[in-house]
Image (cartoon, rainbow, N blue to C red):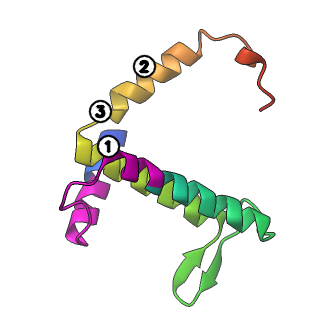
């Protein structure tokens, strides 16, 4: 099933609201902190010795780096849907711009 980024954002926003999330305004700083928390949980899975592609189960709940990265996407899409951010356009604009950048621009390690 192919969905646009904006469709995924609308789906995640709707799913969150159906579960009672995002019904009252949150400061944008808290929304960003929640996204960062999911990235940190992926890092903790790695520090605990799990491989990047490893999913394991705690009862019926999936765990591992792939699950935490999915949570990052869910939170990003929920935020975009909630705030009306056009991710299709933003992503397209950024990819077009990135094609103009030099190889390993800025001298960063990774």
Question: Residue shown at 22%/71% (left/top)?
Answer: 20
Residue beneath the point at 18% across and 60% down: 24
Instruction: Identify which residue, 48 or 9, lies in the foreground.
Output: 48
**Mark 1 or mark 2: whose residue is earlier in sequence:** 1
Crowding at dot 3, Cα within 10 Å, few <14 / some 14-19 / many 20+, comes out as few
Q: How many marks?
A: 3
Q: Which label's residue is closer to the chain start, 2 or 3?
A: 3
In magenta stretch: residue 63: no
* SS state under label 3: loop
Q: Give the spatial CA distance, label 3 vs label 1.
A: 7 Å
In this figure, which residue is indicated by the disc labeled 1?
Answer: 80
Work out whether residue 1 can be spotted.
no
Q: Are marks 2 and 3 in contact (CB under 8 Å)?
A: no
Q: Which mark is residue 48?
A: none
Q: Are marks 3 and 1 in contact (CB under 8 Å)?
A: no
Specify the segment rendered in magenta. Answer: 11-33
Compared across the picture, whether 61 is left or right of 1 comes to right
Q: Which residue is mark 2?
A: 93
**Residue lying furthest bottom in this view?**
59
Q: Give coordinates of residue 61: x percent, y percent.
A: 52, 81
Image quadrant where one finds the C terminus: top right
Name the residue located 42 percent from the left edge and 56 percent from the top edge: 74
Q: Nearer the viewer, mark 1 or mark 2?
A: 1
Q: CA distance from mark 1 to mark 2?
A: 16 Å
Dot 3 corresponds to which residue? Answer: 86
Q: Are marks 1 and 2 in contact (CB under 8 Å)?
A: no
Left or right of residue 106: residue 87: left
Image spot of residue 66 (x, y percent): 61, 62
- 28 drawn magenta: yes
The local secondary structure at tag 2 comes to: helix
């Amino acid at each position: 099933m192919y969905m646009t980024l904006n469709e995924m954002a609308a789906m995640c926003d709707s799913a969150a609201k159906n579960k009672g999330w995002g019904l009252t305004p949150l400061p944008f700083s808290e929304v960003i902190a929640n996204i960062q928390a999911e990235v940190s949980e992926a890092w903790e899975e790695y520090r605990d010795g799990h491989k990047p592609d490893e999913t394991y189960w705690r009862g019926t709940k999936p765990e591992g780096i792939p699950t935490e990265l999915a949570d990052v996407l869910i939170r990003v899409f929920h935020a975009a849907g909630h705030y009306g951010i056009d991710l299709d356009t933003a992503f397209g604009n950024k990819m077009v711009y990135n094609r103009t950048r030099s190889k390993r621009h800025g001298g960063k390690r990774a």
